Image (cartoon, coloured by chain):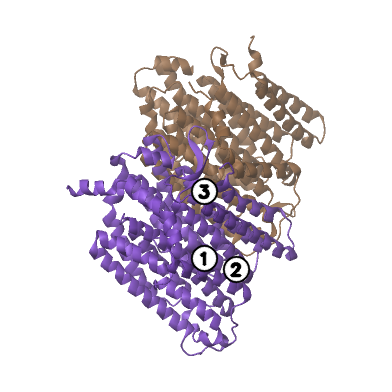
Amino acid sequence: MENLQLIIPELFISIMIMFLLIFGVFKKNSSQLVYNLTTVSLVAALALIINLDTQIQSSLFNNSYNIDSLARFMKILLILSGIFVMLSSSKYIQISKISKIEYPILILCSILGMMVMISSNDLIVFYMGLELQSLALYVLASFNRDNLLSTESGLKYFVLSALSSGLLLYGCSLIYGFSETTNFNQIMVNTKEIEYGLTFGIVFILVGLAFKISAVPFHMWAPDVYQGSPTSVTVFFALLPKIAALTVFIRFLYIPFYELGNQWQMIIIFLSIASMVFGAVAAIGQKNLKRLIAYSSISHMGYALAGLSTGTTQGVQSSITYITIYLVMNLAFFSCLFMLKRNDEYYENIDDLSGLSKNHPLLSLSLLVVLFSLAGIPPLAGFFAKFYIFVAVINEKMYFLAIVGLLATVIAAFYYLRIIKIIYFDPEKEKFESKHNLGLKFTLVASTFFILAYFIYPSGIVDIISQININ
Amino acid sequence: MNFPILSSLILLPTIGALFIFFVRSSNSQYQSSKYVALFITLANFFLSLYLWIVFDKSIVDFQFVEEREWISGFVNYKVGVDGISILFILLTTFITPICVITVNATIKNRLKDFLIAILILETFMIGVFCSLDLVVFYLFFEAGLIPMFLIIGIWGGERRVYSAFKFFLYTLLGSVLMLVAIISIYWITGTTDVIKLYELGIDAKYQNLLWLAFFSSFAVKTPMWPVHTWLPDAHVEAPTAGSVLLAAILLKMAGYGFIRFSLGLFPDASLYFVPLVYTLSLIAIIYTSLVALMQEDMKKLIAYSSVAHMGFVTLGIFTMTQQGIEGSIFQMISHGLVSAALFLCVGVVYDRLHTRLINRYGGLVSIMPKYAIVFMVFTLGALGLPGTSGFIGEFLVLMGAFKKNILVATIASLGVILGAAYMLWLYKRIIFGKLINEDVKKMVDLKRFEIVTLWLLVLPIIFFGFYPEPLINSIEVSVANMVNMNDLDKINKLVLGE
């Protein structure tokens, strides 16, 4: 029990969940207050994580809960994204009348689940975290319960996600059956030779995980859920679960089954190529911005997986860098989306952006920067993200993957350019409101500045990430 | 040299752009932002002129080299110039202020944004010409797409969206393979530093594929036949200043890339692919000249003539002789000046009559005599009349070609005749002939700022036509080094089995 202080952030969030729940129930009309308190407690949790001794590499609870540099970095990323999501969407949930006390508490719950996933070193702990975050997300997706699309997306997400969780659990049980343990490190020791059952287990778990990060061909839920959910939930979907699922991907592939790389490498390469190409092609025909960004995030996950497929530390680090930059880009994009408001109504079709640059030059400039960055055009941050991935991929002589990936960026460039065309080249429409709350403005300015200025000092993030050791 | 003169050259336009961006605008301040842009670009021009003067032309090495750690342990920000790149920097800083002057007449809306785009583009263009690291080069090379895409798309003509997309996607598609090649070079040799790579050399077994990857990028940008189709569209739809920058500088990035990277890094592969380049260049020279003959649209005609002229450039580079490469560089500089001037000339009449169709004009000589004079100089420059800079370039290229392959040289010479045909015919149809169109009679002759810009271009074209020494001097040592360094003659013998 003496090293319980290592999970203080998790404990703190759990306590805050319970406290806020009771507080919200007993105090009338406290939804805004609970929301703000949630943001504050996330900031506090962030401080607690940063405060932990960086040198510590230890496992708790019978070696089933890892506190290491990977977990630390990913948790900081997770909570930072959480804070920014809360800051940018506070106005949105008020206007779209989903400001209830459960909303921020559910977000806290899912963040807690993700933290457990990130640190998990055991199949059961990992599954527990996964379900905690998923259950909260089902409710969040259908939070706007008077809206047909929102309820549909919640239900769809629930049914498909439950199916994938089932597959995942079945995979876990197969692995348990063949390795006699659920602990990641122990699995590595116990599985020196390949058995069919074990391979099946790996495949089932990979399918479940691919579903969580919406890699093709397990992506079907993503466009509908992204479009149907309230935008504040969509931005949450687009950012946080990806961090957690990617971390589990890394842990799962690189600790228990690192030796069996030849078993899973082809699967990851296939997922990666399919996601990159499909995401790019399918986004071309979209009319709804949220749906488009769903396909775009499918494609981006393909690149992150390409880094993982290399089987090297460098590849993993490039994936982590990629996801970091991806988070910032998506945050900036959704901040722009939150600004498309007129008479208490939010606009989310691509056509609504028509001629935006004439009325809102600064907003369109940020969108321009974000979209070019998403397309991976230098000197913006998105280019560097892809660059690191391809450096790792080409180092392993996987030229096919690299060339397909780069050609997919050209296809993807087309639909990003189409949005830019609509913003800059098309005739203008009615003005949007130009008054926004401070949190939203700050999020947009900070993330856009990060994307723009990344090239000045690209080593910063790489240096931090290169200190993460996986095994 | 402690003062980071090259980085200042790169950064100065961006600082200007930021200044224009952050100064709040009202309509009255549009003029002042124009003066800011003009001041910045002129300052940059004089800075690069100073660079050219203090540059030691007798030394082979790269000069004014700056190196800073950038992506730690991987890529260093490294810039430097040799005799070749300094000319292109000078060309860039010379053409950009001229573009800034022309915005008066051509850009009606969002002047501020336009100036910002041009300044940012200048940063990237200068960056391309002085970067000495492959990744840094790629960064600048690709980044230039963003401002150009916006320039064509926002301020372009009717089919601007189509042209902007075509321009962007063609170039991007060509370039991604180059990125694969650059990363591969890093893993093969352990560095992306161009100077180190010159010393290390790249194993011959990798060279062919790497060369092709670089070629795919440069061929699109040059543009070489058959991937040239984006250029006429982009030129026709771009505003005058955009066309000028595109023809004068952006195309030269590819020619520069061929010399610096294809020849410099992959000498064996370059030799291997000479027949391919010869063929494509000859097709570009002959076929696009014929296409140019048939054009009804002035800008399209000049765009096709650019493809033909760039065909001479690629031909000259891959003769791999002192004369051929020098001729190519000279041709690029000269074409930079001449094509810029021709597009400006088209812009002048387009602003008055709002059409680019050749048959709407005719008989301008009696209405606009001053215009007729400058246009004549540029026409003669484009067709390579002795006494203009165009002649020296073509002459040297053909000299190099004759040294290597008489058949190729002969066919290329035919291109000179065709060039004369379409340029003179264009001149005849616009300037001479009967005054039929009533609107043409109302046209006024050159305004003051037009006279200034056009004569600024006339002077170097004629000056370098009679006295090419300064340019040749500047590139001579570097080109000789390039030819000797790769020991091309030795490889020639190896290949031919002598």
Q: Residue at x 28, y 50 (%)?
A: B271
Seen from this angle, which residue lies furthest right?
A28
From the viewer's perspective, is B207 left or right of B139?
left
Q: Residues within 10 Å of mark 3 (few under 14, many from 20)?
A: many
Compared with A99, A181 (above or below) is above
CA distance for labels 3 and 2: 29 Å
Amino acid under label 1?
Val
In this rendered view, identify the residue nearer to me: B164 or A349: B164
Disc 1 vs disc 3: Cβ atoms closer than 8 Å? no
Residue assigned mark 2: B102
Quick one: label 2, few (<14), some, or many (20+) residues within 10 Å?
A: some
Disc number for residue A35: none
**Amino acid residing under circle 2:** Thr
Q: Which chain is purple?
A: B
For label 3, the SS is: loop
Q: Residue at x 74, y 30 (%)?
A: A40
Residue holding disc 1: B244
Which corner quadrant holds the N terminus of chain B? top right
Q: Indicate the chain coloured brown by its letter.
A: A
Q: Do the residues under discs 1 and 2 have CB atoms within 8 angstroms?
A: yes
| Front: mark 1 or 3 | 1
Quadrant in which residue B418 is drawn? bottom left
> From the viewer's perspective, is the residue at label 3 or at label 2 nearer?
2
Q: Residue B443, how many percent across, how many down?
A: 59, 83
Q: Secondary structure at mark 2?
A: helix
The answer to which of marks 1 and 2 sits earlier in the sequence is 2
Q: Please name the residue shown 51% across and 55% down the image.
A: B89
